[in-house]
Amino acid sequence: MYCVKCGNKTEKSVPTGDNINREICTACDYINYVNPKIIVGALPIFSGSVLLCKRDIEPGFGKWTLPSGFMEMDESLEEGAKREAHEEANLELNIKYLHTTYSLPKIGQVYMLFLSEILNDDYAAMHETSEVKLFSLNEIPWNKIAFSAVTFALKNYIEDSENGFPGKCHSNYN
Ligand SMILES: [Zn+2]
């Protein structure tokens, strides 16, 4: 591989004081740390129903998801969740609390999904989305959900609704 700083060759080795093999530049000694990416998103609620977005892109084309995407530099988790919901579904949200964290260690991704109240009624399918729809909890299309993180968040939301919304954050690793 090649150094992202200077373009010279890298070699794999364990830096001093580290215990993981990294790509290290043979010319400028730059260490290319590869760390997980954060996916921010919302669980948008209106009158107890959940808004889902039908995906217009792969992966998961034609399946339903929560508005979410990779967090950008220069934004907070909450700003990222609001931005994604606005970009994909024209949603205006009031963020309530962090509802779900979902770790995918093998592919280096972490979902951070915020339970949010929908403030506007002109939400619509936008970027990367072919359709948006409010689903009551007994009509969620379980066999057409795009990602395991979304299924996990929705199942926990239903459990919360049966337990009077305890307000705790759910994690797929405890
Ligand atoms: Zn270099």
Image: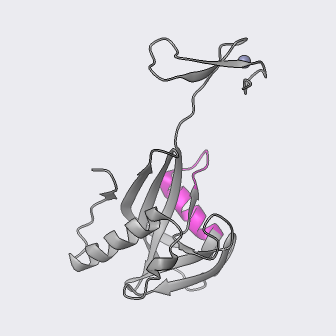
Q: Position of residue 8 (x, y in %)?
A: 77, 18
Q: Please state if 23 lies on the left or on the right of 172 as rendered.
A: right
Q: Please state if 156 lies on the left or on the right of 20 as rendered.
A: left
- Quadrant in which the N terminus is drawn: top right
Residue span colored magenta: 70-87
- The part of the image, by quadrant, that contains residue 151 is bottom left
Q: Please state if 67 lies on the left or on the right of 105 as rendered.
A: right
Q: Position of residue 137 (x, y in %)?
A: 37, 84
* Camera sees residue 83: yes
Q: Quadrant of ligand 1?
A: top right
The colour scheme used here is: one colour
Q: How many discs mark residues in the rendered view?
A: 0
Q: Position of residue 30 (x, y in %)?
A: 65, 18
Q: Compared with residue 38, is residue 168 higher up or lower down, i.e. above or below? A: below
Main SS category, magenta section? helix
Q: Is residue 81 magenta?
A: yes
Viewer-proximal residue among 74 and 166: 166
Viewer-proximal residue among 149 and 43: 149
Q: Is residue 12 magenta?
A: no
- The part of the image, by quadrant, that contains residue 167 is bottom left
Q: Please state if 98 lies on the left or on the right of 107 as rendered.
A: left
Q: Compared with residue 80, is residue 143 higher up or lower down, i.e. above or below? A: below
* Camera sees residue 90: no
- Rendered residue at 20%/75% (across/down): 163
- The part of the image, by quadrant, that contains residue 146 is bottom right
Q: Position of residue 3 (x, y in %)?
A: 72, 23
- Rendered residue at 48%/23% (across/down): 20
In the orientation shown, which residue stands out farthest toward the right? 7
